[in-house]
Image (cartoon, rainbow, N blue to C red):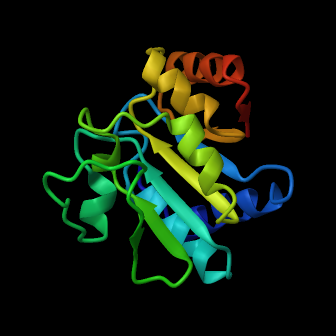
Amino acid sequence: PTLSDDDYELISERVMQIEGKYKTVLFAATSLNSLPITIPVNVGVCLAQTGKRCLLVDTDTRRNALAKAFEIDEIAGRELDSPREYKTSFENLRIWPGHNFSHKHTFNITEVVKEAKNNFDFVIITAPYLDDSQKQRQTAAAADCGFIFSQNADDATRLSSLMKSARCSVI
């Protein structure tokens, strides 16, 4: 989908409305066509520009799109105890690229996101391939609430059920 600046601002405003109640927001989809990386990037930038400290978490290990969007290279061969945080050119915006969650790193996303919530106003988890696998259920469980991005009603219904079973409120 092609979104305008107004769309990003609308999503950002909706995220700001939940401040105080929720800190961790899931952007969920079943395909890249429904959730291109530009959506979480632009929402994160909007939030950062209002002074909110924001962490974008990319669970897309296939493309590592968040790192590419911010021109960040993976540090090869490093074993990490926790996800590596990267600065961006925006003062209040940090990222955890998808390579943090590759097969060579076995973080429990629920635990590491819980710790990150202490340092940020918002943690946005982008999950463009959310399905009912154990790993993806953990991703949904790491979020307090989430948005569903879908071009298909059946996919949206499945995502809603998955999120609700993980106690992630659908916005």
Left or right: residue 52 versus residue 99 is right
Q: Is residue 131 visible?
A: no
| Residue in the image at 43% along x and 63% along y | 95
Q: Position of residue 148 (x, y in %)?
A: 58, 36
Left or right: residue 6 versus residue 16 is left
Q: Is residue 122 visible?
A: yes
| Residue in the image at 29% along x and 61% along y | 67
Left or right: residue 129 versus residue 171 is left
Using the image, determine if residue 72 lies above or below residue 154.
below
Answer with the quarter of the image where residue 74 lies. bottom left
Using the image, determine if residue 163 lies above or below residue 54.
above
Q: Nearer the viewer, residue 12 or 108?
A: 108
Which residue lies most toward the left here?
A: 76
* Quadrant where the C terminus is found in the figure: top right
Q: Position of residue 90 (x, y in %)?
A: 47, 82
Using the image, determine if residue 91 lies above or below residue 137.
below
- Report the number of discs: 0
| Residue in the image at 65% along x and 65% along y | 120
Answer with the quarter of the image where residue 30 lies. top left
Q: Nearer the viewer, residue 36 or 74?
A: 74
Q: Position of residue 138 (x, y in %)?
A: 54, 26
Answer with the quarter of the image where residue 43 lies. bottom right
Which residue lies most toward the right here?
A: 20
Left or right: residue 171 versus residue 148 is right
